[in-house]
């Protein structure tokens, strides 16, 4: 008999490209959570994503301007 693990929930971090957001994302990834990195600048997000992956974590970058009209729809998709 094999047991199946349920998938780990992802942590969505807004403002993940720098400062406190980046620190939260790196800490969550270090603790084993998959992290969705959200900020306006894809270039900055990719730097953070790369650092998390190099440290053995799981991260995905999602460039979104949360002041935009359809931003929440982008996050839902």
Image (cartoon, helix red, strand yellow):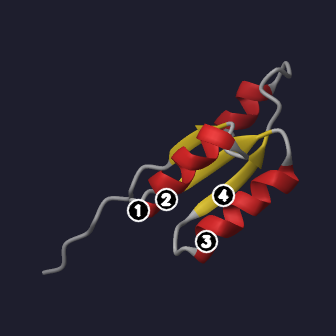
Q: How far apart are marks 1 and 2 (CA)?
A: 5 Å
Tell me if label 1 and label 4 are in contact, CB under 8 Å: no
What residue is pinned by disc 2? 29
Q: Is mark 2 on a helix, strand or loop?
A: helix
Q: Residue at x 72, y 54 (%)?
A: 61
The image quadrant of residue 64 is top right
Above/below status of 7 relative to 65: below
Question: On the picture, is 7 further left or further right than 63?
Answer: left
What residue is pinned by disc 4? 60
Q: What element carries label 3?
A: helix
Mark 4 or 3, nearer chain start: 3
Mark 1 or 4, nearer chain start: 1
Mark 3 or 1, nearer chain start: 1
- Residue lying furthest left in this view? 1
What residue is pinned by disc 3? 53
Which of the two discs, 1 and 4, sits closer to the camera? 1
Q: What element carries label 4?
A: strand
Mark 2 or 3, nearer chain start: 2
The image quadrant of residue 74 is top right
Most foreground residue, 9 or 45: 45
Locate the N terminus by quadrant. bottom left
Q: Which class describes the residues within 10 Å of circle 4: few (<14), some (14-19), or many (20+)?
A: some
Mark 2 or 4, nearer chain start: 2
Q: Which residue is drawn at 55% across and 65% down?
A: 58
What residue is pinned by disc 1? 32
Tell me if label 1 and label 2 are in contact, CB under 8 Å: yes
Which of the two discs, 2 and 4, sits closer to the camera? 2
């Amino acid at each position: 008999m094999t047991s199946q693990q349920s998938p780990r929930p992802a942590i969505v971090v807004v403002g993940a490209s720098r400062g406190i957001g980046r620190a939260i994302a790196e800490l969550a990834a270090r603790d084993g959570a998959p992290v969705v990195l959200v900020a306006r600048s894809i270039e900055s997000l990719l730097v953070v994503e790369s650092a998390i992956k190099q440290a053995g974590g799981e991260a995905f970058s999602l460039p979104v301007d949360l002041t935009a009209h359809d931003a929440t729809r982008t996050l839902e998709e």
